């Protein structure tokens, strides 16, 4: 794999900051194609997120490639 891509990894001592969008099923299908879900680039999951103190389900995409090593993970400030 060449270049950089974004993903998340489970860590019960950390969190991910992001935004929550309300998308249509048509937009979700387009996003699946863009992220390469059908070709195995990313896997799609639903997880709970907290927004304004309320817990809600959210769609996430997680990188499928097993070769991503811990050394490739960076901390963004």
Image: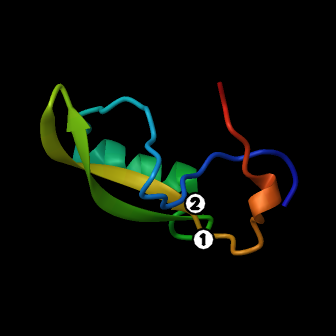
- Up-down: is 10 above or below 74? below
Horizontal and vertical percent position of residue 22: 23, 34
Colour scheme of the rendered structure: rainbow
- Up-down: is 19 above or below 69? above
| Residue that carries the numbered disc 2 in the rendered image | 36
Counting other residues with Cα less than 10 Å from the Cα at mark 2, is it few (<14), some (14-19), or many (20 or more)?
Answer: some
Q: Residue at x 40, y 52 (%)?
A: 60
Q: Nearer the viewer, residue 9 or 58?
A: 9
Q: Nearer the viewer, residue 13 or 22?
A: 13
Residue 39 - label: 1
Horizontal and vertical percent position of residue 68: 75, 65
Gap in angstroms between the C-alphas marked 1 and 2: 5 Å
Q: Residue at x 84, y 46 (%)?
A: 3
Horizontal and vertical percent position of residue 15: 43, 43
Horizontal and vertical percent position of residue 57: 20, 50
Quick one: which residue is furthest to the right in this view? 2
Element type at mark 2: loop
User: Does the residue at mark 1 contact the one at mark 2 (Cβ under 8 Å)?
Assistant: yes
Left of 20 or right of it: where is 11? right
């Amino acid at each position: 794999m060449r270049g950089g891509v974004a993903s998340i990894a489970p860590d019960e001592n950390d969190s991910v900051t992001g935004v929550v969008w309300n998308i249509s099923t048509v937009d979700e299908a387009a996003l699946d194609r863009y992220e390469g879900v059908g070709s195995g680039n990313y896997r799609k999951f639903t997880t709970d997120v907290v927004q304004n103190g309320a817990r809600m389900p959210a769609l996430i995409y997680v990188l499928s490639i097993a070769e991503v090593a811990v050394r490739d993970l960076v901390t963004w400030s």
